[in-house]
Amino acid sequence: MWQLSTHYLWWILALLLIAGELLLPGYFLLWIGVAAALMGVLLWVAPGLSLLTQAILFGLLAFAACFAYARWLRPKLERRAPGSARLNRRAEQMIGQRYELIEAIVNGRGKARVGDGQWLVSGPDLPLGSTVEVIAVDGTTLKVRAAA
């Protein structure tokens, strides 16, 4: 009768955990799956490990993988994605940008050229052609101040 080697069971568990990550995203099943895959490699190299040793090593590897992700990888990924916190609020990505007024700000309202379009702006009264800096966004209106 055909018997499945223990290292294959660890690799199957790894695939199931990584597939579970696709269904329930959160990154931890992925790293526990990586630990299971490493256990499969360990058992392939050293097949005589007892079940208790396997369980302890798996726990340590899972903890180490999750810790390494949380400590080193996650902060690097967050730094590489500027504006990711504002990803679904595109207008907020304009904060700090400078634009030219195409309509003077009178009574607190005007228009600025943004790319090939124009946006409503609110701020202190300024003449046509002034450069303004976006300090906040209120719906579809950019709140601006005179650029220094």
Image (cartoon, rainbow, N blue to C red):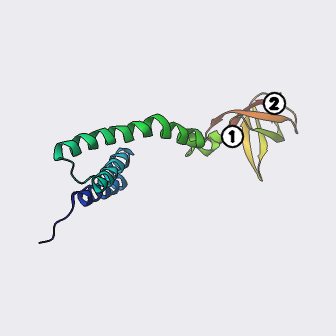
Q: Mark 1 or mark 2: name the one nearer the start of the chain.
A: 1
Foreground of the two, 68 or 126:
68
Which residue is at the far left?
1
The answer to whether 147 is drawn above or below residue 141 in the figure is above
Q: Amino acid at mark 1?
A: Met
Foreground of the two, 36 or 82:
36
The answer to whether 108 is drawn above or below residue 99 in the figure is above
Residue positioned 67% across, 39% down in the render? 141
Residue positioned 59% across, 42% down in the render? 80
Residue 61: % across, % down: 33, 42
What is the spatial separation of the Cα atoms under label 1 and label 2, in whole angstroms? Answer: 14 Å
User: For residue 111, which numbered disc appears in the image?
Assistant: none
Residue 101: % across, % down: 82, 40
Do labels 1 and 2 touch, CB within 8 Å? no
Residue 1: % across, % down: 11, 72
Residue positioned 76% across, 33% down in the render? 133
Q: Amino acid at mark 2?
A: Ala
In this rendering, position of residue 114 left or right of residue 28: right
User: For residue 147, which numbered disc appears in the image?
Assistant: 2
Q: Give the residue number, with chain letter if any, for mark 1.
A: 94
Dividing the picture into quadrants, the one containing residue 70 is: top left
In this rendering, position of residue 63 left or right of residue 78: left
Residue 134: % across, % down: 72, 34
How packed mark 2 is, by other alpha carbons closer than 10 Å (few <14, some 14-19, many 20 or more), is: some
SS state under label 2? loop
